[in-house]
Image: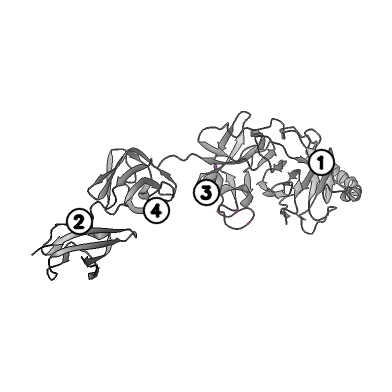
């Protein structure tokens, strides 16, 4: 909620806050008896910590666990941290500030905010930043009012925030959570996530697509951001936990609300053509680009159902180009039946995009018919590389040749008497086909 908070001076404010904190602590015992939180800060009140705080052990007039503050617009309570380089530790789903936290002082501070049993911390460095976490769908912007047992109206002021209203290059906006962060001084902003944030689902498991977005009054717009090498909460960043920080400082008041979104990544190449066509028992793939920038390679992926894909080859790309470049690849062992193909265009930094999908159908058994027929000396199989073994039975069903491994030289039958035989071909993909052949002398 973008409101102005005035203080005559930082020193004067701290003196006033100290008195407010002492008065408030005296009234906390009764509040702690209810179910609203271990410590409660009512509407219009403030509580201030002048040193570090641990949500596991408590201290400074607050009990361990949840500190509940009133969220109602124009009448909210605030927990202040006043001092340079303070820290708040031990925050978890069982211990956090359910409401607004403000920091006074310099140094990065991780705001221990949460909502209704879910911690959702963020970080900022500038003096005077204040914020709260909402574990709610921004489309409704409604969270529970633990003071009344009902729901607040949409918060912060200006909500709800339609996730279908998106700015340039924003693909999907989170409906899990959002933050109200306020302040006039420019600062880097950092948002954190855990498994409940569903970042994998949001980004289709592509962490490089993650960004911070801000609500500008009409839509969610992308704020240049980068996933941190090491999370502000410790540990490496992955799809289940981590943090992301704005590339440049900004005044939190710039946007009404903040959350996560997935970006539409630019293609590493401009693909102008991609075709797939059957030729004999092979599939020939051709594609062309007219522009490449930091492109690394093309992974050729194939599927028999359009759902499960596997890489069958990689082709190095030109890298950087502004002219027409043609590429090709031959799939020498396509599947019997449907063959779906797509290109995975991979950039040097690991970002990638997919081409459209092409379908080629290969008739079952095509290219596996033995020849010549009748045969005098050797049975030949055009696509012998697909055959794991060949067995030959005579007219009485007796196996006369077993576990043959066909090659381009064929299967020698010169020692067999003339007559009618059945050859059984077992392919590497597990399919089996049988064919009648006649041996003559």
Identify the residue at horizontal 66%, vertical 47% (top origin). 123
Residue 203 x %, y %: 53, 45
Q: Secondary structure at mark 1?
A: loop
Q: Write down the residue under mark 2.
A: 382
Disc 1 versus disc 3: nearer the observer: 1
Identify the residue at horizontal 55%, vertical 37% (top origin). 222
Provide the residue span drawn in magenta.
224-238
Q: Secondary structure at mark 4?
A: strand
Point out which mark residue 125 bears: none
Q: Distance from label 1 to label 3 (Cα)? A: 38 Å
**Figure quadrant of residue 162:** top right
Q: Distance from label 3 to label 4 (Cα)? A: 21 Å
**Figure quadrant of residue 41:** top right
Q: Do we see residue 111 in this rendering?
A: no
Q: Distance from label 4 to label 2 (Cα)? A: 26 Å
Q: Write down the residue under mark 1.
A: 149
In the image, farthest residue toward the left: 441
Q: Does residue 225 show up magenta in the picture? A: yes
Q: Distance from label 4 to label 1 (Cα)? A: 52 Å
Disc 1 versus disc 2: nearer the observer: 2
Instruction: Work out whether mark 1 precedes mark 2 in sequence or the reverse, and give the earlier one.
Output: 1
Instruction: Work out whether mark 1 precedes mark 3 in sequence or the reverse, and give the earlier one.
Output: 1
Instruction: Work out whether mark 4 precedes mark 1 in sequence or the reverse, and give the earlier one.
Output: 1
Q: Write down the residue under mark 3.
A: 207
Q: Write down the residue under mark 4.
A: 310
Q: Secondary structure at mark 2?
A: loop
Q: Does residue 398 show up magenta in the picture? A: no
């Amino acid at each position: 909620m973008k409101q102005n908070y005035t203080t005559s001076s930082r020193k004067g404010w701290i003196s006033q806050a100290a008195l407010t904190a002492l008065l408030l602590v005296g009234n906390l015992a009764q509040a702690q008896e209810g179910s609203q939180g271990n410590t409660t800060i009512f509407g219009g009140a403030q509580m201030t910590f002048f040193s570090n705080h641990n949500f596991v052990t408590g201290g400074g007039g607050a009990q361990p666990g949840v500190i509940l503050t009133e969220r109602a617009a124009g009448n909210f309570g605030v927990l202040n941290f006043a001092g340079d380089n303070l820290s708040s530790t031990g925050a978890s789903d069982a211990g956090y500030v359910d409401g607004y936290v403000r920091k006074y002082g310099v140094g990065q501070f991780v705001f221990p905010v949460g909502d209704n049993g879910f911690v959702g911390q963020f970080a900022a460095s500038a003096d005077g930043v204040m914020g709260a976490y909402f574990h709610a769908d921004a489309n409704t912007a409604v969270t529970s009012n633990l003071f009344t047992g009902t729901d607040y109206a949409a918060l912060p002021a200006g909500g709800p925030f339609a996730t279908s209203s998106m700015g340039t290059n924003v693909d999907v906006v989170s409906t899990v959570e959002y933050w109200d962060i306020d302040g006039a001084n420019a600062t880097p902003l950092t948002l954190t996530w855990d498994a409940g944030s569903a970042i994998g689902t949001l980004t289709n498991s592509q962490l490089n697509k993650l960004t911070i977005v801000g609500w500008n009054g009409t839509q969610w717009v992308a704020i240049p951001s980068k996933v941190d090498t090491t999370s502000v909460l410790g540990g490496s960043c992955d799809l289940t936990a981590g943090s992301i920080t704005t590339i440049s400082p900004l005044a939190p008041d710039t946007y009404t609300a903040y959350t996560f979104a997935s970006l539409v990544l630019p293609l590493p190449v401009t693909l102008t053509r991609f075709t797939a066509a059957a030729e004999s028992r092979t599939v020939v793939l051709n594609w062309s680009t007219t522009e490449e920038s930091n492109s690394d390679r093309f992974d050729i992926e194939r599927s028999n159902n359009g759902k499960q894909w596997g890489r069958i080859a990689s082709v190095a790309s030109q890298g950087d180009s502004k002219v027409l470049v043609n590429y090709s690849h031959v799939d020498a062992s396509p599947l019997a039946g449907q063959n779906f193909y797509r290109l995975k265009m991979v950039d040097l930094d690991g970002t990638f995009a997919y081409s459209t999908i092409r379908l080629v159908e290969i008739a079952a058994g095509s290219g596996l018919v033995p020849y010549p027929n009748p045969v005098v000396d050797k049975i030949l199989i055009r696509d012998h590389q697909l055959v794991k073994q060949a067995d030959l039975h005579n007219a009485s069903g007796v196996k006369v040749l077993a576990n043959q491994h066909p090659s381009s030289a064929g299967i020698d039958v010169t020692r067999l008497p003339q007559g009618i035989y059945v050859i059984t071909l077992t392919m590497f993909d597990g399919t089996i086909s049988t064919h009648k052949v006649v041996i003559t002398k």
